[in-house]
Image (cartoon, grey):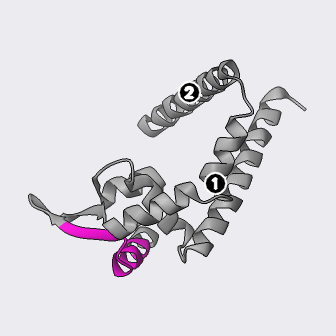
Amino acid sequence: MEAYMQLMLSFANVQKNMVRFIQKSAVEKGLSIPQYSILMTIISCSEMTQKNIGERTFLPKSTLSQAVDGLVKEGYLERQQVEDNRRETLLALSEKGRALVEELHLQEDGLHQVFKAASEQLTAEQMDELLQAHEKISAYLTRVELEVAVK
């Protein structure tokens, strides 16, 4: 098998395993996978527009809207209209939402702790090389995607 195919399968295997942990954590906390994705996306910012979350998660608009509605209903997200643009919705984690995300990060058999333990098997040099390789692949794929979109 060619090296690029082995690399693609390697990425697919890591992703498959990560999704399994995400599914387990989401179900245990009464969340859907889209809801989990939204929470993990918004935690890096104090607030985000629903449109930006959609762009980062690649969730279809209807799935995104349903997931956000559920998170707002459960009290994990706070929603408000953007002042200058009534069509934009600004989302922020509530205190309850922040506590849930922290629980997910600290969950002993959850993705974050398991992935942390897995990464600790790598030396600092291996980690740097892996991150550099991922960055190169990601940058190349992004460049090609933009070139194709322009055509």
Q: Nearer the viewer, mark 1 or mark 2?
A: 1
The residue most toward the bottom is 73
Residue at the (72%, 29%) spot, across then down: 122
Residue at the (61%, 66%) spot, across then down: 25
Q: Is residue 99 magenta?
A: no
Magenta span of residues:
66-80
| Above or below for 10 versus 15 | above
Residue 87 x, y percent position in the rendering? 19, 66
Q: To which residue does mark 2 refer?
A: 135
Where disc 1 sits, the SS reads: helix
Query: Which badge, 1 or 2, comes first in the chain's sequence?
Result: 1
- Please tell me which residue lies in front, 61 or 116: 116
The amino acid type, in three-letter code, at marker 1 is Leu
- CA neighbours of label 1 inside 10 A, class few (<14), some (14 to 19), many (20+): many
Residue at the (19%, 68%) spot, across then down: 80
Where disc 2 sits, the SS reads: helix
The amino acid type, in three-letter code, at marker 2 is Glu
Q: To which residue does mark 1 refer?
A: 111
Residue 17 x, y percent position in the rendering? 73, 53
| Above or below for 125 versus 46 | above
Left or right: residue 133 versus residue 17 is left
